[in-house]
Amino acid sequence: MTDKQVENNEVENEEIKGLSRRSFLGAGAAIGGVGLAAPVMTSAMFAAQAEAKTKEKMAHAAAVEPGELDEYYGFWSGGHSGEVRILGIPSMRELMRIPVFNVDSATGWGITNESKAILGNSQKFMAGDSHHPHMSMQDGHYDGKYVFINDKANTRVARIRCDVMKTDKIIEIPNVQAIHGLRVQKVPHTKYVFCNGEYEIPLPNDGRDLDNVSAYRSMFNIIDAEKMEVYAQVIVSGNLDNTDADYDGRFAASTCYNSEMGMNLGEMISAERDHVVVFDILAIEKAVKAGNFRTIGDSKVPVVDGTKENAKAKLTRYVPVPKSPHGLNTSPNGKYFVANGKLSPTVSIIDIKKLADVFDKNLDPRKAVVGEPELGLGPLHTAFDGRGYAYTTVFIDSQIVKWNVEDAVKAYTDKNVKYIKQKLDVHYQPGHNHTTMGETRDADGKYLISLCKFSKDRFLPVGPLRPENDQLIDISGDEMKLIHDGPTYAEPHDCMIVHRSKMKPKKLWTRDDPIFAGTVAMAKKDGVTLETDNKIIRDGNKVRVYMTSVAPNFGMTEFRVKEGNEVTVVVTNLDMVEDVTHGFCMTNHGVQMEIGPQATSSVTFIADKPGVQWYYCNWFCHALHMEMRGRMLVEKA
Ligand code: K7E
Ligand code: CUA
């Protein structure tokens, strides 16, 4: 055992004897260890856990009964699983998974022609790392229309349509590497999605300047939300992390670490201060309209210079904050940006009104910082309840800190003012947290989710790879109360919680849905009416098989092709019944897909095996679901 592990296990044992977790994790942090090693489960630990469970059960009595509906939809990112998940809050029941950057066997995402058309050139990646799901807004209120999400792994941004809960656009962002922080413009509406290119690279990154580190840059990206095109990019000094927008429609702000432009850890954390970069979106729009931009390589995207050295352009300002800040969150009253210290035990409160003076009257940017409360070790992200309180995750201390924002501002000049209201242990090491409606004007302060990176002893051990722990906390009263442990698979970095009144998902597809418009056009060319026809079109080596489905039948129970034919099967689900989804699976061909009620889906494969190949419906649809199948007869070439 290493020293760290020994200490960690001792610490776990102390916890059972009743010592506070805070003191031991604090001690672990003090010697530089974060206490991450998984403990060995002892019977005493199981007993302690059972006791804790009973307590939590009592608190949980207020949760959702079977058959009842949740009050909120939660959109969870799926981290390096590449997907998005929908949970009901407060039950924490997982309602749906939306494949985005991953390949999904159940729905055929990444397999069907419709999904490949959306994935475009990037379908070759088959992997992704989704961090930040955020919903479009109208005047600072969720509009229930889209959820946007980044792919850090392959530098992409995707859009999910909330009427059908499917991804409808995915774009690759040029000239940058690793899209990380992502938020939407809140006011006047989500015209733009803001996202950060995290890693600095040469511009263009075509093999030049490999060793010329001083030429590396990272950029802030402004995406047209409706067109899903990059509107403009802003070169910055340092590399960007998280971002958020104001409630006035003028500023976005990003945390910026590595102002040193270092290439390794030691170099990256040498300076005492890094920055929050503030972007004047209106000034950037003006610069683009005036043609004050350049383009890079083959990309046509306007690129403007927002580096620290180019201060005279007034596109950006750099607010110094303690080194390596991480989360950036706007208070729902629109007054403050809060930058979370990560390596500093503080968060920096930036007065958004004063930022106008920083840009317009040359006020010293540091003067916009109006509070820097000390909260604990490793502050990462902050959420708000709409009643003046903020909730910050402190990673190393494994806690949520509830603090009063205005009191923290007062404490900046009057050390006697207390601002911390409560510290709650969470299990363990939280990253993001999120309150109900908390990133909008409608923050209602009912629930808080703590997305804990480690579950350790909270669940039955399932091998070396453990679930994470998304904890539900009741924040409606004076005190935060932990009411539910939610194991989750890798790795929900972030979530957003929207009241159900904002959502109007469809029950059936409409036949003119743009997601399958391409397939409808192909059928039209073939003279096929999808809603009535069961037809085979032979086009040289290509065969297109059009069939309908009505539970428990495919419109075609056999079709004949030649070995080596490229076969496209198009299925139109004529069922009008809510929740009757069919599937199509061609055995031994790696082909399957979902066809929702009134939808059309298609898939293309090579019939490379002579003989009888059965296809079947793989979404349970009817008492005779097992019988819903047919034969592809493949003649030897
Ligand atoms: Cu803090 Cu990618 Cu939002 Cu993870 S980031 S925690
Ligand atoms: Cu159709 Cu199962």
Image: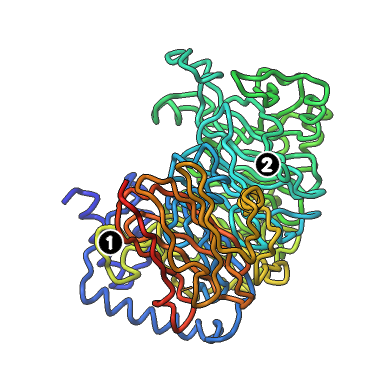
Q: Which residue is mark 2?
A: 228
Residue at left offset 70%, top offset 23%: 304
Residue type at numbered disc 1: Val
Residue type at numbered disc 2: Met
Nearer to us of marks 2 and 1 is: 2
Give the side of residue 506 with respect to residue 189, left or right: left
Residue 577 visible (yes or no): yes
Give the side of residue 495 with respect to residue 457, left or right: right
Answer with mark 2 or mark 1, whichever residue precedes in sequence.
Answer: 1
- Residue 202 vs 484, above or below: the answer is above
Quadrant containing the C terminus in the rendered view: top left
Q: Position of residue 164 (x, y in %)?
A: 63, 62
Q: For residue 228, what is the image quadrant?
A: top right
Q: Which mark, by number, is residue 11? A: 1
Colour scheme shown: rainbow
Give the side of residue 280 with respect to residue 342, left or right: right
Q: For residue 64, what is the image quadrant?
A: bottom right
Q: Which mark, by number, is residue 450? A: none
Residue at left offset 70%, top offset 25%: 302
